[in-house]
Image (tube, rainbow, N blue to C red):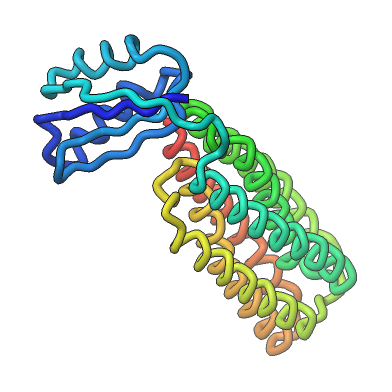
Amino acid sequence: MHKTTFEITKMDCPAEEHLIRLKLEGIASIHGLEFDIPDRKLIILHSGQIEQIEHSILELNLGGKKLITEEVEAAETTENKNQQKLLWTVLIINFAFFLIEITTGLVAKSMGLIADSLDMLADSFVYGISLFAVGGTLLLKKRVARLAGYFQIILAVIGFAEVIRRFFGVERIPDFSTMIIVSVLALIANGICLYLMQKSKSKAEAHIKASLVFTSNDVIINLGVITAGLLVHWLDSNRPDLIVGTIVFLFVIQGALKILKLGK
């Protein structure tokens, strides 16, 4: 593994950073980029030769100049290990709450809880897929973000179809107390995940950004299910639960579209 430092004399703002990222994203040998805009420096962690990377930077006409190439240990960096630890933590939390919510949702006949459980399952798969991207190329990380977006859209369509089936069918009124208690616990869990990812130094990575979008949506969804539970009790009807279930899947689709943007 090698670390090469470039001086980019015309890199004055994030616009140049974005331009460089777009230019380099298709190079499979790149494992990481670190931008120092105030000092106009770019550090690239890569495998193999630097010629293709250097040629791409020079083509941008931003005053790029290679300063030094150093050999570094091929073992995982501390940052990669931190990313793995973070992703494993949120994966375990989300999968545990998928099991809790799908079980209690089926028992309580709550579409809101079932919808949220599927969202938690989607998150679990996303975090699992993201673990393969830690330390990988920028191109791989963007592909992970796209895969996450498509997966979430599929789950949203399946869940929305179930909401429609329940709306026209005859269903028992959900157990509002179970809805509220489980959703409060899920809200706390998602709040912890969001806090851990927000404080992560890796939150600029495409796959970590994807995880942030998912978890932010989850917090909103949990609040919606709690509200639905209160309305189910107040109105003595399953309609609030079904309405919130529909809204949940709209949020899921909206989040998926944001993820797909990150993967471009």
Residue 46 can be seen, yes or no: yes
Query: Could you tell me which quadrant the C terminus lies in?
Result: top left
- Residue 124's spot in the image, x, y percent? 69, 51
Residue with the most extreme right position:
107
Q: Is residue 63 above or below residue 203?
A: above
Q: Residue at x 42, y 33 (%)?
A: 32
Q: Which quadrant holds residue 68?
A: top left
Q: Residue at x 69, y 89 (%)?
A: 234
Q: Residue at x 59, y 34 (%)?
A: 147
Q: Residue at x 68, y 49 (%)?
A: 122
Residue with the most extreme bottom position:
234
Q: Is residue 187 above or below residue 45?
A: below
Q: Is residue 13 above or below residue 98?
A: above
- Residue 98's spot in the image, x, y percent? 76, 60
- Residue 217's spot in the image, x, y percent? 53, 60
Q: Left or right: where does residue 56 sit relative to residue 81?
A: left
Towards the viewer: 43 or 73: 73
Q: Give the total of numbered labels.
A: 0
Q: Left or right: where does residue 101 sit relative to residue 226?
A: right
Residue 115 can be seen, yes or no: no
Towards the viewer: 156 or 87: 87
Q: Which quadrant holds residue 64?
A: top left
Q: Left or right: where does residue 251 sit relative to residue 202?
A: right
Towards the viewer: 55 or 192: 55
- Residue 188's spot in the image, x, y percent? 62, 76
